[in-house]
Image: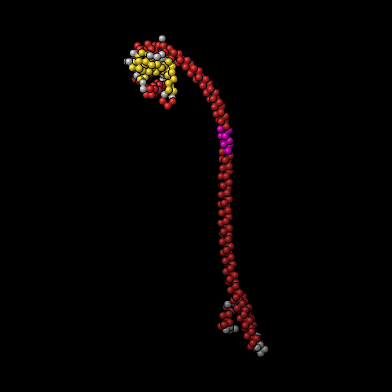
């Protein structure tokens, strides 16, 4: 059986299975053509060809739809592959997060332990501070007690010192006039006494020994200190008061120091300062 070029082209566009069916149908139609030729009209034959054409068009559309479906399936497969890849990445990330979470929990556990240890240490420190505070309080009480006792000792020593000093002063009042006349040619004009003297700026100075005298025909003032053992600081303080008095009164002052003991360096210092001094035994 020979097909026209158009029919052949149309048959090539049809799926193999359907093409076989159509060829078989055409062959059958060809065998029966002579039988039908008297009874089948041209219109009916054209209708048959139209049906065949529609079938071919339908098959073409079906093929195109199949192609689109396959393309869509491929796209879905690609999307599925990407989804699976993304799920795999998420699973990996989840695993990494889980590991990180475990490490974080480990660090948190260590930190909690450290905080607990620090809390205990803080408690021990606070307890120690409290103990130290109590010890400090007891120490302050002891210091206060010792301060009171020291104050009493100081007062007693001052009392003894004053007693010794007063005794030395009283002996000086009688013994110094002849000694000063012998050693310095000073003639005492008024009895030697203990006297409070007012200095500039309202300051008061108690002179252990005070008296008016004449030296080389000139009136002078005798000012003296009586000490058990004088220090350089005490001597400088005494000389400062002597100078203030001399400047304020405009009179020459003869400084005298009487003591029970003069260490060698003190004797040297007094000589350098031009101060006359007497040992207590010289007053006998």
Compare residues 133 and 78 and report the one nearer the observer. 133
Q: Is residue 246 above or below residue 98?
A: above
Query: What segment is highlighted magenta in the picture?
Result: 119-129
Residue at figure coordinates x 52%, y 23% from the top left: 147
* Residue at 56% in and 34% down: 125
How far across and down, in percent of the image, does residue 52 sit? 62, 81
Residue 272 seen from this side: yes
Is 248 on the left-hand or right-hand side of 4?
Answer: left
**x, y percent for residue 99:** 57, 49
Magenta span main SS: helix
The number of numbered discs placed on residues in the rendered structure image is 0
Answer with left or right where residue 233 lies relative to residue 10: left
Residue 125: in magenta span: yes
Where residue 51 appears, as percent x and y from the top left, is: 63, 81
Q: Position of residue 183 (x, y in %)?
A: 34, 13
- Nearer the observer, 67 or 180: 180
Q: Residue furthest bottom?
A: 38
**Picture quarter with the N terminus:** bottom right
Question: Which residue is drawn at the image coordinates 58% and 62% (left, top)?
Answer: 80
**Colour scheme shown:** secondary structure
- Which quadrant holds the C terminus? top left
Question: In the rendered structure, does residue 237 fall within the stretch colored magenta?
Answer: no
Please state if 223 lies on the left or on the right of 30 as rendered. left
Whether residue 7 is situated above or below residue 71 in the rendered picture: below
Task: In this rendered view, identify the residue nearer to me: 215 or 88.
Answer: 215
Residue visible at 62% across and 75% down in the picture: 17
- Front-most of 207 and 107? 207
Quarter of the view holding residue 67: bottom right
């Amino acid at each position: 059986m020979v097909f026209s070029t158009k029919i052949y082209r149309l048959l090539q566009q049809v799926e193999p299975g359907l093409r076989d069916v159509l060829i078989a149908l055409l062959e059958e139609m060809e065998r029966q053509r002579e039988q039908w030729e008297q009874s089948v009209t041209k219109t009916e034959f054209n209708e048959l060809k139209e049906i065949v054409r529609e079938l071919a068009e339908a098959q073409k559309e079906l093929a195109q739809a199949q192609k689109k479906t396959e393309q869509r399936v491929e796209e879905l497969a690609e999307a599925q592959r990407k989804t699976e890849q993304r799920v795999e990445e998420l699973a990996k990330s989840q695993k990494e997060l889980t590991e990180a979470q475990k490490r974080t929990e480990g660090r948190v556990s260590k930190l909690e332990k450290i905080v607990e240890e620090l809390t205990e240490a803080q408690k021990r420190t606070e307890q120690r501070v409290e103990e130290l505070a109590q010890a400090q309080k007891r120490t302050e009480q002891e210091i206060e007690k010792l301060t009171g006792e020291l104050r009493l000792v100081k007062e007693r020593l001052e009392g003894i010192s004053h007693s010794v000093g007063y005794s030395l002063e009283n002996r000086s009042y009688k013994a110094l006039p002849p000694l000063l006349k012998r050693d310095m040619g000073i003639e005492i004009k008024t009895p030697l006494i203990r006297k409070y003297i007012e200095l500039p700026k309202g300051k008061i100075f108690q002179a252990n020994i005070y008296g008016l005298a004449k030296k080389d025909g000139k009136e002078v003032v005798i000012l003296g200190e009586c000490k058990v053992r004088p220090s350089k600081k005490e001597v400088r303080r005494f000389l400062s008061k002597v100078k203030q008095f001399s400047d304020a009164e405009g009179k020459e002052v003869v400084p005298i120091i009487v003591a029970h003991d003069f260490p060698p360096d003190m004797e040297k210092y007094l000589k350098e300062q031009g101060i006359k001094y007497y040992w207590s035994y010289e007053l006998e």
